[in-house]
Image (tube, rainbow, N blue to C red):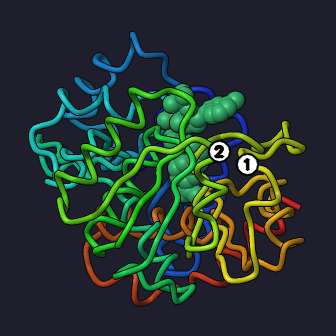
Amino acid sequence: MKRFALLGEPLEHSLSPLLHKAIYRQLEIDDASYRTVALPEERLKAFFTGFRVGGFDGVNVTIPHKAAVIPLLDEVDTKAKLINAVNCVNRNGNKLTGYNTDLLGFAYSLRQNNVSIGGSEFAILGAGGSAQAVGAVLAEGEAKIVSIMNRTADHAERLKQTIHKVNEAVRVDIVDEQELATRAKDIDCVINTTSVGMFPNTRTSPIKEEIFSSNMLAFDLIYHPLKTAFLRSAEKQGASIVNGLQMLVAQAVYSVEIWMGGNIVAHVDMNSLVRDLEKAIK
Ligand code: NAP
């Protein structure tokens, strides 16, 4: 039996066990289990001591441990190290290797929605852990301009540095909402990486409705609710919208591929997994 888990805190509302079980069902893997392990920061080190010698074959890591696990690993994938966030750990014997599949999941969802990164203009709202993954993907894809809007200036500056570490040719501007509104007509895609609008605070949006227009794509990393206030106001202005569900599904499938090997991403019906989760969220 292969055993996998999600580490974080709090985890009561996590969809990951449901999602992983649906992936195993689709792949007809009947000797794998996935469960949540609610873990406060002070128990992380002890958990990893046990993990290294058995117990689990792989783990996903979520808020607040994505950076804190890094010193506990033997190896970290280059991009995960660059963005200082690991959300997937594989155990091979006693060796622990960290990856970031949020990054892969976000890139997958952009591709599925025909978003071309090269030469396009983006705005990232927020500058936390997931924004680092988003920024790295946009930099790697050679975005023309990335405007960052965030509450805390230091975090925005750190995100700008990450983008430039990946690709220094990308123009990165830190903006406030007024400046964002001024340049909105040229922006192809606005990505919400803040937690503003997440259940249960479903009435709030990180930006005003006037910023959206019909030639924009609004991408919200949030998936609960399926249509946030951010996406609702974008839709009202005629913008195309994408929520975070496809990214969530894809990061989980990439994790399974890392743990089990093989070409799992190509063999899974992601759309059917998205539909399973939509039913669970509604
Ligand atoms: P995080 O590291 O805690 O970052 C949160 C960001 O939101 C920070 O930039 C923070 O600003 C900003 N923020 C929080 N409350 C705010 C408020 N009231 N007003 C303005 N800004 C606020 O979290 P994360 O890991 O990046 O996750 C962010 C969201 O993405 C969550 O909703 C999460 O569920 C979602 N997510 C989805 C996926 C997916 O697969 N779809 C993957 C990862 C994350 P400061 O910098 O000023 O603190």
Residue denoted by label 2: 177
Q: Work out which quarter of the rendered image holds the C terminus and state it.
A: bottom right
Q: Taking 238 as reference, is 48 above or below it?
A: above
Query: Is residue 101 shown left or right of residue 182?
Result: left
Where's residue 146, x and y in %? 41, 60
Label 1 element class: loop
Q: Is residue 16 left or right of residue 230?
A: left
Q: Quadrant of ligand 1?
A: top right
Query: Is 47 above or below relative to 204?
Result: above
Residue positioned most to the front: 182
Q: CA distance from mark 2 to mark 1?
A: 7 Å
Image marks 2 and 1: residues in contact by CB distance under 8 Å: yes
Image point 45% across, 48% down: which residue? Answer: 131
Q: Quadrant for the N terminus, please.
A: bottom left
Q: Can you give x and y, in whole percent of width and height, for residue 266 in the image?
A: 40, 89
In the image, 18 versus 115, the foreground residue is 115
Q: Can see residue 57?
A: yes
Query: In front of the other: label 2 or label 1?
Result: 2
Q: Which residue is mark 1?
A: 207
Q: Which residue is nearer to you in this view: 114 or 216?
A: 216
